[in-house]
Image: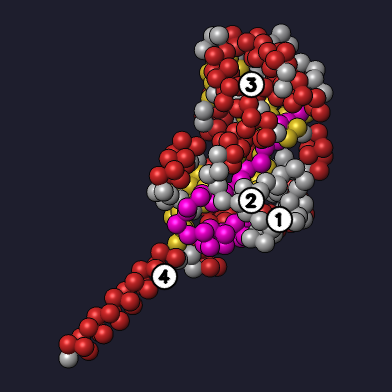
């Protein structure tokens, strides 16, 4: 009996452990910045992914680079897949905080040239553009970044991001630098100073420096500013909601969003399953229905409803005329440039 009881206990414990492993393996944690974007990701990808695979997706918010680094360096990673873009993504990749993702893991053969990165799967393309109040400019509205800086022709308060990615590029484009020379100029002290001087010139007309994409849309709609540099998808949300705002596609700064797997994440296999899912053409085309960000696959755009397609940043024409953010440049210069930008914001 004692032997039988011991065998029974061992078998029972093994069964419980297997069940616990199975329960853990059937879920993952996705983390982004909340708001309309995370709502769209949930509707387009997370919910249907769970329905099709049986893998439960838990959600969290606030994936700051500092928090990601602390998790990885202390071996206490609780997030499986994290969404990011721009400076944070580029610096995090250089700090070895993300798992490499090979073609064997996730097929990215159809990804738009320039969007691929070995440490993340491109999730969407969004753009920084000029948004404006249609009450302030019902006729002859601003068309490009030069118009944003032209306070004589387009008077009124401006709204600028609290972070510099896209703003420095827009400043040089507004000052007449050709798109293919922007990063070469920014890589020189003279060119960087030129961009910062442009921001100093517009600073007296900046009513506030926004840190929330929803905040800038509401500010334009309520009259707290007449013109803003902001994200195209968020402006489109406001337009769709009937707010008195519009945006110009005369010039744009394109950015790519990425989904990454953190080093030492709890469940790499389930994380890869989600990445493979969001990388498919069908899934890529679906996000645009919920938020006006463009797919990252060349074969996904034709799957988007034509009326919706015209609102997206990744149409062939807009890709030709947009400047893609160079995340390699930002990984190298981002910390210093962010401090210089902050100094200008504060009156320096």
Q: Nearer the viewer, residue 57 or 258?
A: 258
Residue denoted by label 1: 108
Q: Is residue 164 magenta?
A: no
**Residue 22 - label:** 4
User: What residue is rendered at 67% in x and 46% in y?
Assistant: 117
Percent x, y of residue 202 = 64, 12
Disc 3 is placed on an element classified as strand
Percent x, y of residue 169 = 70, 24
Between disc 1 and disc 2, whose residue precedes?
1
- Distance in Å between CA atoms under marks 2 and 3: 33 Å
Between disc 1 and disc 4, whose residue precedes?
4
Residues packed near mark 3 inside 10 Å, few (<14), some (14 to 19) or many (20 plus) = many
Between disc 2 and disc 3, whose residue precedes?
2
User: What residue is rendered at 59% in x and 57% in y?
Assistant: 275
Residues packed near mark 2 inside 10 Å, few (<14), some (14 to 19) or many (20 plus) = many
Say if 337 sits above or below 304 in the image.
above
User: What residue is rendered at 80% in x and 25% in y?
Assistant: 181
- Distance in Å between CA atoms under marks 3 and 1: 37 Å
Residue denoted by label 3: 227
Between disc 4 and disc 2, whose residue precedes?
4
Q: Are marks 3 and 1 in contact (CB under 8 Å)?
A: no
């Amino acid at each position: 009996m004692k032997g039988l009881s011991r065998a029974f206990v061992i078998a029972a414990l093994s069964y419980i452990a297997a069940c616990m492993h199975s329960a853990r393996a059937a879920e993952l944690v996705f983390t982004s910045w909340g708001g309309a974007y995370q709502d769209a990701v949930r509707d387009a990808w997370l919910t249907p992914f769970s329905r099709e695979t049986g893998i439960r997706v838990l959600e969290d918010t606030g994936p700051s680079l500092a928090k990601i680094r602390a998790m990885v360096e202390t071996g206490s990673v609780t997030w499986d897949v994290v969404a990011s873009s721009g400076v944070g993504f580029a610096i995090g990749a250089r700090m070895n905080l993300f798992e490499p993702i090979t073609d064997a893991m996730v097929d990215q053969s159809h990804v738009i040239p320039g969007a691929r990165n070995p440490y993340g799967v491109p999730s969407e393309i969004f753009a920084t553009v000029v948004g404006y109040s249609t009450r302030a400019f019902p006729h002859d509205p601003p068309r490009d970044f030069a118009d944003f800086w032209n306070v004589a022709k387009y008077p009124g308060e401006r709204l600028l991001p609290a972070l510099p990615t896209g703003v420095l590029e827009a400043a040089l484009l507004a000052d007449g630098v050709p798109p293919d020379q922007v990063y070469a100029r920014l890589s020189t002290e003279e060119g960087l100073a030129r961009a910062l001087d442009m921001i100093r010139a517009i600073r007296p007309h900046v009513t506030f420096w926004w840190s929330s994409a929803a905040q800038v849309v509401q500010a334009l709609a309520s009259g707290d500013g007449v013109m803003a540099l902001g994200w195209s998808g968020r402006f489109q949300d406001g337009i769709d909601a009937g707010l008195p705002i519009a945006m110009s596609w005369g010039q744009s700064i394109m950015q790519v969003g990425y989904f990454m797997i953190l080093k030492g994440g709890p469940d790499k296999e389930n994380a890869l399953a989600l990445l493979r899912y969001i990388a498919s053409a069908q899934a890529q085309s679906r996000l645009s229905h919920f938020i006006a960000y463009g797919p990252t696959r060349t074969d996904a755009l034709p799957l988007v409803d034509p009326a919706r397609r015209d609102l997206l940043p990744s149409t062939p024409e807009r890709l030709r005329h947009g400047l893609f953010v160079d995340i390699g440049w930002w990984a190298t210069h981002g910390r210093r440039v962010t401090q210089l930008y902050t100094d200008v914001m504060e009156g320096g």
